[in-house]
Image (spheres, rainbow, N blue to C red):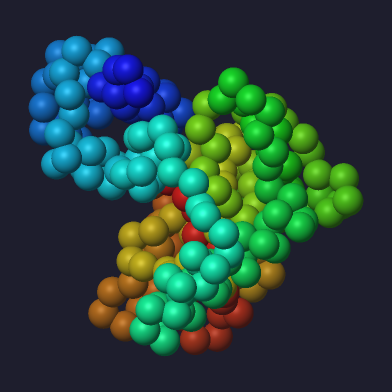
Amino acid sequence: MENLAAYVGSRIRTLREARNMTPESLAEKLGVSRVAVNRYETGARKANQDILFKLANIFHVSINDFFPNTTSIGNSQDLVDVYEQLLPDRQKKVYNYATNQLNKQKNNYSSSFLGNDRHLVYIYGAVSAGTGEYIPQDDDKPEKVIVDGVVPDHDFAVRVNGDSMEPVFNDGQIIYVNKLDNVEVRNNQFVIAEVDGEFYVKKLRLEKGYVQLISLNKKYPNITIHEYNDFAIRGVVII
């Protein structure tokens, strides 16, 4: 590519804007000045490997997402040769990932790329950020919304209903979720949780033998999970 720094810079800006992040807030997370962020985004300054790894962590993307796709896969035997060199536990991960991608391709129920950084996103209901509820949509008739910018790979999308998770998630915002069977749940992640038949989007806290669902808006109490609660995590929100 004629100007790789400019391409990488445009990707940084696209990913930042897709997350409603200001140059100032990104600079703070990176530990650099706002001027440095501007120079990265315009291509006037080349983002080194350390910066790119930090950006990948901040945006929750692969470092490869900053670069153009210039590689191509050979024939299927090349894939088989690589697979057979892996240890059994890694082979299982490859199989699970490939199966998940195939299911998404067959169902095509999450989103479709329209070109020019535009996506058609299928929204399957709303999940409460406040009192707890779930508003399902007919699976055959999801809400269809055109979204500009980066849409992460996801299993399903829902809308936020309520303000208990502001300022991270606003009322009416579209959030993208991975099903639990495709991801690992960790402390302090944002999750879709079911408690006694009601659904919430909350921050998960796992400490000292107890589970809490945390509200970011202090107007709303946290939810402590007890043994008598019917509790399950249905997905992890992609940030």
**Residue 165 shows up from this direction:** no
- Residue shown at the point (68%, 42%) measured from the top left: 111
Q: How many labels does the image show?
A: 0
Residue at x 68% of width, y 48% of height = 110
Tell me the quarter of the picture where residue 99 sits: bottom right
Residue in front for this viewpoint, 17 or 73 = 73
Q: Where is residue 220 in the image (x, y as percent from the top left)?
A: 46, 49
Q: Is residue 84 above or below residue 106?
A: below
The answer to whether 19 is drawn above or below residue 177 in the figure is above
Task: Judge left or right: residue 194 versus residue 89.
Answer: right
Q: Quadrant of residue 22?
A: top left
Q: Where 33 sits versus 156, above or below?
A: above
Instruction: Tell me which residue sits at (81%, 44%) in the image.
Output: 142
Q: Can residue 96 be seen in this view?
A: yes
Residue 23 falls in image quadrant = top left
Asked whether, in this view, residue 143 is left or right of residue 170, the answer is right
Q: Residue at x 40, y 63 (%)?
A: 204
Residue 217 position within the rendered picture, expressed as x and y whole percent measured from the top left: 41, 43
Q: Which residue lies furthest to the left in this view?
A: 32
Residue 7's place in the image compared with 110, above or below, is above
Q: Residue 232 at what x, y percent from top left? A: 57, 74
The spot of residue 166 in percent (x, y) is 44, 38
* Of residues 230 and 114, the one drawn nearer to the viewer in this rendering: 114
Considering the image in quadrants, where does the N terminus appear?
top left
- In the shown orientation, is residue 200 left or right of residue 84? right
Name the foreground residue: 130 vs 142.
142
